[in-house]
Amino acid sequence: MTLKEAAVNPLRAGMRVNRAADSCAVVVFGATGDLTARKLMPALYNLARERLLPGGFSVVGFARRDWTDEQFRAVMKEGVAKFSREPLQEELWESFARGLHYVSGTFDDAQAYARLGERLGKQDHAHGSAGNRLFYLATPPDAYAMIAQRLGEARLATPQQGSWTRLVIEKPYGRDLPSARQLDSSIGQVFRERFIYRIDHYLGKETVQNIMVFRFGNGIFEPVWNRRYVDNVQVSVAETVGVEGRGGYYEESGALRDMVQNHLMQVLALVAMEPVASFRGDAVRDEKAKVFHAIKPIEDVSRDTVRAQYSAGAILGQMVPGYREETGVAPDSRTETYTAMKLEVENWRWSGVPFYLRVGKRMPKRATEVAITFKTAPLQLFRQMGGDNPTPNLLVLRIQPDEGISLRFGAKVPGTRYDVRPVNMDFRYGSSFGVAPPEAYERLLLDAMLGDSTLFTRWDGVEAAWELLTPVLDAWADGASPIKQYEAGSWGPDAAREMIERDGRDWHRM
């Protein structure tokens, strides 16, 4: 099957798509990096396999290495063969690879952008991409503003008549509120907001998308999705890995910048947002922004936040070093590999309901989930009859690795007593649908080509998240909430457990 044949009927594939994407060229800056080979190219290849790429689709890799088109194609083939969720098919790859090209240059070299423009012009003629451009910044964040500036100077950011130009930016979007505003100002001089797609791959995950379907597509849940029935909400991300040789990068980032400001805050917003009238335009992003603005600033950082580093310990039976012993990490580092915090959404729906966030490296297992605990029934009925009252109802949305949803409720144990035990109703994507869900980047790249920005973050949401979290970073820098230690292979520091136990609650055991 050729790529042209694959593009004939994109609706035959199983993924959601309202219309076929326009023919376009995707330009990947930083194309020789890990992200391109591990995520972007396998995603594009699988979109071709699913018949979702338009005819005339092509890719231009842009990076410093002095590669030819053939070298670029060979390295990308290795990446697809190793990381694609579906096996590489030679015939499809040969058709797909004919649209892969490469331009060598540094991000500040004006002549390289001139060469890029020439190559894109040739591809318009050869592939029929009609001047449509999707620029993808798979680069270190300090290159974002430079690339946008050079694209503007080379007149590549300005679409031709009847065509479009869009910019996709990876996280992190700034290190704090001032740097984020400066970056947005620099990029905004070249690209208008509606053409900027800030990508958060968590929003492309099936279970994250299913939060909206679960809430707004099922009449039995939305009526209890509020402060009258919900006791607390927990958003948790646990990773078994450490910094994986990226100690130098992580020293400049930390768990709050790396995960909380983007991934966890976006998931929180989907859980807490109000219903939308449609999924068109900015409807979803409007409601998410309202959530961010409704979150109460953290008044006591030492009480309502915890930060910690992993020390040496055992993961899955193997001893691992502590964070300060990792390559590139300062021996007196104060960078957090774990953080937990309590947030409150001060609006009519959620007032009084705590939202607890936690994320950590070197945890006992890999898991990402949202746990929603409901309030107990008001009458202690079964205790009066010689039994036990049921544990609170619990709804768990598992984002990874075992995507699914489970609901815990009480049931009577067979016998003469009214003993009530918790039981689970469990839904799993793999067993229910019989197919593996697409990778997050497949959905998000397709949406960017379609011009659908629903699952991308908008500047006002980014700004509101930084407005909330920058004071936390500042307070930590001033010594609030001193850095704790937790053993690798544990569930985090005692301080995190003590923080939630002060409210009479416990962390959900993942």
Image (cartoon, rainbow, N blue to C red):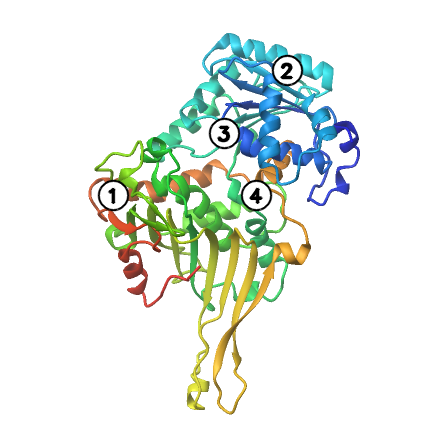
Are there few (<14), some (14-19), or many (20+) residues within 10 Å of tag 2?
many
Residue 476: which disc? 1
Q: Is residue 358 left or right of residue 416?
A: left
Q: Are marks 3 and 2 in contact (CB under 8 Å)?
A: no
Which of the two discs, 3 and 2, labels the residue nearer the N terminus? Answer: 3
Q: Quadrant of residue 249?
A: top left
- Which residue appears at 52% of the width and 40% of the height? 201
Between the residue at mark 1 and the residue at mark 3, the CA separation in whole angstroms equals: 32 Å
Secondary-structure class at tag 1: helix
Amino acid type for the residue under numbered disc 1: Trp
Q: Quadrant of residue 442?
A: top right
Amino acid type for the residue under numbered disc 4: Gly
Secondary-structure class at tag 3: helix
Residue 487 in view of the camera: yes
Which of the two discs, 1 and 3, labels the residue nearer the N terminus? Answer: 3
- Quarter of the picture containing the C terminus is bottom left
Q: Badge 3 is on which residue? A: 34
Between the residue at mark 1 and the residue at mark 4, the CA separation in whole angstroms equals: 32 Å
- Which residue appears at 49% of the width and 9% of the height? 110
Q: Is residue 263 left or right of residue 1?
A: left
Image position of 318 with respect to 221: above or below: above
Q: Position of residue 314 (x, y in %)?
A: 34, 50
Q: Is residue 383 left or right of residue 274?
A: left
Q: Is residue 204 left or right of residue 356?
A: right
Are there few (<14), some (14-19), or many (20+) residues within 10 Å of tag 4?
many
User: Is label 3 or label 2 in front?
Assistant: 3
Residue 58: which disc? none
Q: Position of residue 333 (x, y in %)?
A: 24, 38
Q: Badge 2 is on which residue? A: 120
Q: Nearer the viewer, residue 236 or 453?
A: 236
Q: Badge 4 is on which residue? A: 204
